[in-house]
Amino acid sequence: MRPFAFPAACTAACTAALLAAIPAAAWAWGNHTPMCYRAFERMPEVAGAAPVKAEPLADFLRAQEGAIAKVLDAQEAWAREHLKHHAARPEALRWVASPGASDAERRAAFLKAARLSPQSRLALYLQLDPREPESGRPALDAVAVSSAPPSKGGTQRFVALQAGQAVSPLAVLASACDEPDYGHDLNLFDDNPGHPAYGFGKQPFGNPAVAVGSQAPFHMGFFHQGPVFNTLAPSFARTFTELRVQHYSALAVLAWQTGHAYWGWRFAGMALHHVEDLTQPYHASAAPGASLGTMMWVNLKAQLGAPADRQGLVVLQGNRHFVLEQFQTRWILESARQRRDGPLEVALRDLAQDGRYPPWSPSYVREVVAAQAHAAGPETDAAVVVGAPARFVSDPNFDFAANEAQLGPELARDLQSQRDGLHRVIADLLGHFGAHSRNALRGMLRQVSQPVR
């Protein structure tokens, strides 16, 4: 018997419908930094590491431009061989050592070769541990650190570092774990406004006209939706999380190997951000609260002229994602300010979980992290629906994201009597967040002893 094949016209129509129906929220866990302080503060490899000196990016690029060229070429070759849907880097972007270049020219060339937004700041900064007393240092304006539009409910607070200033690896690592959300991946696709011609093609999902949504394909991974979904919506397989993890990891290893420890910890944190994003079920599932049949049904109705249910699905999935993120972020920050340990802090620090997973490898992101988060999707979505006020998570006419700043305190208050179920689910997810982050970091550190190529 011949296998069933979807007619090409049907596949194209269904793909377009699914693309419109699935939300692409920009952030997975809100602010990663407070969680990373807890996840790494008792990991011996981090807690016992010697302070490092803050170093401008230009110094690292100038000192190691030949080695960086080799690393970026090796990573591109690896991606072309191992990532099925990789968008090959245009030859014009290739990093070439240019000893006579200025620091500004070298920096711009690096951003092109790494295919990061030309507006990426990569400034010297820290996010301080919210558990520690105020440092007394003046705040650094967010625009010095991030080119991304400010989030209405953002909790990031920055201070400046000076070149040569001693700083703990924990602070560098935890700060950098949030950094890829600061505009590194905005407007990089061919149909985004002002795109830099990086060869990524058209944006595979999300709205290409919305800047923040354009970063979603670099922070999500729909690797386990199944063959029917993949046939109907093949573009959802085009995600670039694995590429970012590999690039940042390789740069971290090079920096450690060549005496640039500050950038070793910093690039490691950036790699970990993309690993951590995929521990969020709403970033590893197209719509964890809806079956494929439901998505197809609402899309069919939309094609027949009744789009309300499809739009409602988008709003509900987005609302639940935002509610989960708000609850988790506020809970973490409140506990930190009170120097209080609760289930989330215990879960984030639980080193006993680390050994339950296979050793770190290039396939770990897809086959371990994303697979686990995808499997947790239905339970997570159900816990949010049961644990949060109905108007926030069950009313398709209510857009939580549009009212995030005003409704955050109300959400926290209304959840007080209903949060036990969410506690358990979020604690489980953050246990995964901590374990996978540490396993990824160990994988990078193991490579440091290998000879520089």
Image (cartoon, helix red, strand yellow):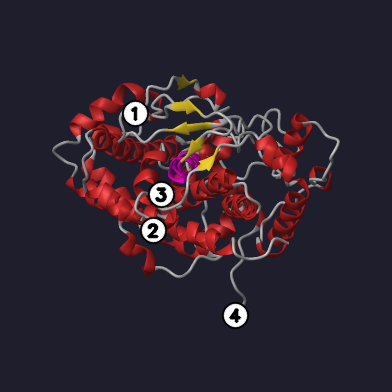
Inspect the image, locate mark 1, and give the three-letter code of the amino acid beneath it: Phe
Q: Residues within 10 Å of mark 3 (few under 14, many from 20)?
A: many
Residue at (54, 44) in percent of width and height: 266
Please say if 268 is above or below 413. Answer: below
Queried whether the magenta region covers residue 175, the answer comes back as yes
Calculate the distance from the C-alpha at mark 4 to the C-alpha at mark 3: 40 Å
Residue 435's disc number: 2
Q: In this image, 440 relative to 406: left or right?
A: right
Closer to the eye: label 4 or 1: 1
- The reply to whether the C-beta atoms of the residues labelled 4 and 2 are less than 8 Å apart is no
Question: Around disc 1, counting alpha carbons within 10 Å, would you say few (fewer than 14), some (14 to 19), or many (20 or more)?
Answer: some
* CA gap, disc 3 and disc 2: 14 Å
Residue 30 lies, in percent from the top left, at 41, 37
Which portion, as a residue range, is magenta? 168-176
Please give the residue where the numbered disc 3 appears in the rendered image: 280
Q: Nearer the viewer, mark 1 or mark 2?
A: 2
